Image: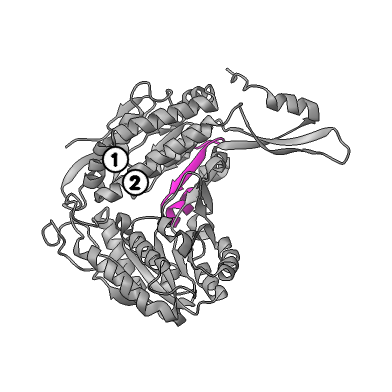
């Protein structure tokens, strides 16, 4: 069986010891294997010394040009990458494109951002006088940290997760050691082969670690950045790692998120806005088989609209349930979960939520799916649950605390009031994204103020823009991706703001004229 290799310290390493087998999650057929790699401390040192020096020797514009060329290269390999995502990720073609095109879009986005910057630093705000009448000024500037970026990515977006983080760090001038999740690592491994082809990137700018993370965090240094996407439990272990705490290395976490859609009391069936809600709910529940950190998990519906919305969403989901199966068949609308473990966890999660909900649609134990033998593959058909209005208000209810990472969502009836909606959303203890559907400007204004503290991003949808609206789970390079509380309290992307994760803010204090001359000068040559 083909063994995938890590790329560390400038060489490809097949790894040693017991190997993990990667499979097709629709057919359970083995595809490849990965084994643990060693020398992780040396790999980080190589990144800091060689990769960092090479990246900082390039200007912002030059780094942007490299990213632009990489986006073009990856787009040329798009069909090959889609095929890998279908086979190892269980993605439909549409879901594979969502991951891969999203990844290429972030690379291209940060190519453009970097191309518009200059100098060896970013000026952060205006210079401020130290005291009234003083010629002395304080000016904040941002410069690249001289460590490595350690990226630990989740299984659900092997392209977007890896390249999205990489593009920001590369633009900022910080080298990357990327560790993808093992179960879907074939796509990340192939992308890495393209990225690491001669002449694409400066030496040391990118390394790939397949298999277990081993002692990687034992070698973290004070200038390093650790960016993790995954479960809150793993994120907490990373934050609490002795070496991470001892060095005060910078850590960014993007974790579990019980995202909510809030439907305003003015929404009526038969409108374009109502149709948009039905479409968005179905997309967010079934895209990537519900394996998205931005998927809508809780749907807040005014009690008067509950029956009509329930029927409309069930009708749309039933069509997808009938065409859930092997994603190699383009007629199927949804594929499997990524692994047997994910399927077990999702089924157990449905049972947990079932303690306080009724099941409106879906059978978590269904075994027959299109294109595969009965019982084969890690499938879960769309599951729609419904709670009572009383349970929706209970902050201890499981749907406010337990995320089923699959095609599962819960309808939560509420009285249509802003404070009630905010109370329910807040019970999730922090989310990546929320969506507000309303044409009532007063309701929207009050709800925005009440909901925003609990969210990293709030999508506002109304009848006027319904035709142009995009599903709320889409993440864009110019928009912040992160959220408070259980969502990790981190932040990625957000245009130029995303660079700040990899930059050090320093106050330059001196004479106004001296600072003006210094900050208007061309970028100095890096120190030897």
Tag 2 and tag 1, C-beta contact below 8 Å:
yes
Q: Position of residue 283 (x, y in %)?
A: 34, 60
Check disc 1: other Cα within 10 Å, few if <14, some if 14-19, many if 20+.
many
Q: Is residue 450 left or right of residue 301?
A: right
Which dot, 2 or 1, sits closer to the camera? 2
231 and 509: which is toward the camera? 509
Residue ID for mark 1: 187
| Rendered-image quadrant of the C terminus | top right
Write the start and end of the magenta stretch as one range.
219-238
Residue 4 is at least partly visible in this image: yes
189 in relation to 446, above or below? above
34 and 107: which is toward the camera:
107
Q: Is residue 149 visible?
A: no
Q: Is residue 94 magenta?
A: no
Give the percent coordinates (x, y) of residue 139.
Answer: 73, 35
Instruction: Name which quarter of the figure residue 22 lies in.
Output: top left
Is tag 2's residue or tag 1's residue first in the polypeptide sequence?
2
What x and y, as percent, mark residue 450? 59, 67
Q: Is residue 203 above or below residue 299?
A: above
Q: Which mark is residue 33?
A: none
Q: Identify the residue at image location x=26%, y=35%.
A: 4
Q: Please give the name of the residue rendered at 34% of the width and 56% of the height, measured from the top-left corner.
A: 291
Mark 2 is surrounded, within 10 Å at the Cα level, by few (under 14), some (14 to 19) or many (20 or more) other residues, namely many
| Residue position marked by numbered label 2 in the rendering | 99
Which residue is at 37% across, 21% downward? 199
Indicate the position of residue 108 as horizontal and vertical percent values. Answer: 43, 36
Tell me what residue is drawn at x 57 percent, y 61 percent. 452
**Vertical order, 233 against 39 (above or below):** below
**Which quarter of the figure has residue 211?**
top left
Q: Residue furthest right?
A: 133
């Amino acid at each position: 069986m083909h063994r995938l290799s890590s790329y560390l310290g400038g060489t490809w390493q097949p790894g040693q010891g017991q190997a993990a087998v990667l499979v097709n999650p629709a057919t359970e057929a083995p595809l490849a294997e990965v084994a643990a790699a060693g020398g992780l401390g040396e790999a980080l040192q190589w990144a800091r010394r060689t990769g960092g020096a090479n990246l900082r020797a390039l200007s912002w514009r030059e780094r942007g040009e490299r990213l632009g060329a990489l986006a073009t290269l990856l787009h040329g390999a798009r069909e090959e990458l889609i095929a890998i995502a279908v086979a190892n990720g269980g993605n439909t073609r549409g879901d594979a494109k969502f991951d891969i095109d999203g990844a290429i879009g972030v690379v291209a986005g940060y190519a453009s951002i970097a191309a518009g910057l200059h100098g060896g630093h970013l000026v952060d705000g205006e210079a401020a006088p130290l005291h009234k009448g003083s010629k002395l000024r304080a000016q904040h500037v941002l410069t690249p940290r001289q460590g490595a970026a350690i990226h630990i990515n989740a299984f659900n977006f092997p392209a977007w997760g890896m390249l999205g983080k990489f593009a920001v760090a590369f633009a900022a001038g910080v080298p990357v050691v990327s560790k993808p999740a093992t179960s879907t690592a074939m796509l990340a491994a192939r992308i890495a082969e393209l990225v690491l082809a001669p002449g694409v990137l400066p030496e040391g700018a990118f390394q790939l670690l397949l298999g277990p993370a081993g002692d990687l965090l034992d070698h973290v240094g004070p200038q390093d950045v650790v960016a993790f996407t995954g479960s809150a439990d793993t994120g907490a272990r990373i934050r609490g790692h002795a070496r991470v705490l001892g060095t005060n290395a910078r850590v960014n976490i993007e974790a579990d998120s019980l995202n909510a859609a809030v439907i305003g009391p003015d929404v009526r069936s038969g409108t374009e806005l109502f149709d948009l809600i039905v479409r968005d709910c179905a997309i967010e529940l079934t895209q990537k088989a519900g394996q998205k950190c931005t998927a809508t998990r809780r749907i807040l519906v005014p009690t008067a609209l509950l029956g009509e919305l329930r029927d409309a969403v069930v009708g749309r989901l039933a069509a997808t349930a009938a065409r859930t199966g092997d994603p190699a068949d383009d007629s199927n609308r949804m594929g499997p979960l990524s692994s047997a473990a994910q399927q077990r966890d999702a089924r157990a999660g449905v049972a947990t939520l079932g303690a306080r909900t009724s099941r409106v649609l879906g059978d978590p134990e269904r075994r027959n799916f299109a294109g595969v033998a009965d019982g084969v593959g890690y499938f879960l058909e769309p599951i729609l649950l419904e709670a009572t209005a009383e349970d929706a208000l209970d902050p201890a209810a499981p749907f406010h605390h337990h995320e089923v990472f699959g095609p599962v969502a819960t309808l939560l009836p509420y009285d249509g009031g802003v404070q009630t909606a905010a109370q329910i959303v807040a019970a999730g203890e922090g989310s990546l994204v929320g969506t507000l559907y309303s044409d009532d400007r007063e309701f929207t204004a009050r709800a925005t103020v009440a909901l925003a503290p609990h969210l990293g991003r709030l999508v506002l949808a109304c009848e006027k823009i319904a035709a142009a609206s995009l599903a709320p789970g889409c993440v864009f390079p110019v928009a912040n991706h992160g959220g408070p509380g259980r969502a990790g309290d981190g932040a990625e992307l957000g245009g130029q703001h995303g660079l700040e994760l990899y930059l050090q803010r320093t106050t330059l204090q001196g004479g106004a004229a001296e600072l003006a001359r210094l900050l208007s000068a061309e970028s100095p040559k890096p120190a030897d």
